[in-house]
Amino acid sequence: MNSSKDDKMQRRYRSGEAARLAKMPVTTLRIWERRYGVIAPPKSESGQRLYSEDDVRRLGLLKTLVERGHPIGTIAKLPAAQLEQLAQNRADSELVQLAAGAGRPRAEIALTVVGAALVQRLRAENLDLLESGIVNMMTFDDLAEAGASDAHDAADALLVTITSLHDDVAAHILSLGEACQTKAIAVAYAFGTARAIQTLRLAGVRLYREPNSRSELRQILDDLSQAARGLGAAQQPGMWSRAPRRYDDRTLTDLATRSTTIACECPRHLVELIMKLAAFEQYSDECRSRSVEDALLHRHLGDVANRALAMLEASLARVVSEESLADVRRGA
């Protein structure tokens, strides 16, 4: 009862004032709320978010921890007590690893950065790249210099900053990413055409507006590093990777006709779906397109078909395993 009464008596702040008190940009506050759900303040009758003093204190703690190198995605949902403990003891990183589900060795990331202004800023900010798992960083002043170099072959992640994002620039970025066989690409831009932005999104590129603060720059590096290591909510494979076929058509046909222990038609249906998906993947890859957008669309469709194909082949493998065990039990 007393806690509820105290909460109602707390002063409430609008988003601009709350962000100012937490010493962070309003845009960052909105991104954190929308993307990570760091806080859920009530709204006034006019739809304005109203932040309590506890909310502002939480935002301040989160900002401090992010500036120390903790990715916002791993600490966004932690209770206040754990946030305060992290703030008091910087060396205590186990809570963050637990929140992120990390119990495995951290992969080492090779990062290629394109853009003279961003390179200069990274050096000026003196960010600890090891906090994001980045052990090697190669830099280029612009896309032309990066494209002309053969020194970026082993890039795990590609970070490009560009002022004006147009169709030809988008195509150049994707060409560079494919040449590097990079696992993740991020682009920070000031202005861009809707078609160029859609083209990059369709290809799986992470898009950001030019970062205005140290914490936003840190967040981009953390997001890109996680994507390159195959972490995060999406758990997507590398941008240019495809799972190999587990069964060829002859083996599939044999598996469809020799089912003995399962009375239903599931094995045959699985085989039919797998063969159709394999055909659609090949069709998408072979489809000739006149524009970058169409080419990316068909590559996207081929990627989706490949992932669905891999899942269905795994299911068929389980069916085959179950039937083999049943044959052993029967003494076949």
Image (cartoon, rainbow, N blue to C red):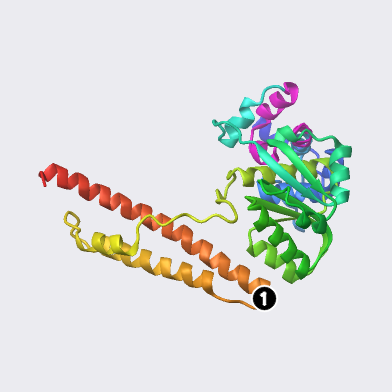
Residue displayed at 65% across by 58% down: 178
Give the image quarter of residue 23: top right
**Residue that protrudes farthest toward the bottom in the picture:** 290
In what element is the residue under mark 1? loop
**Disc 1: CA contacts within 10 A as few (<14), some (14-19) or many (>=20):** few
Q: Main secondary structure of the magenta part?
A: helix
Magenta stretch encompasses residue 83: yes
Residue displayed at 69% across by 41% down: 110
Viewed as shown, does residue 162 lie left or right of 184? Answer: right
Magenta stretch encompasses residue 56: no
Residue 39 appears in the picture as rendered: no
Viewed as shown, does residue 51 lie left or right of 226? Answer: right
Query: x, y (%) of residue 144?
Result: 81, 59
In this rendering, the answer to whether 149 lies above or below 90 is below
Residue 35 appears in the picture as rendered: yes
Q: Amino acid at mark 1?
A: Ser
Q: How many marks?
A: 1
In this rendering, the answer to whether 253 lies above or below 210 is below
Q: Which residues are magenta?
A: 61-90
- Residue that numbered label 1 is attached to: 291
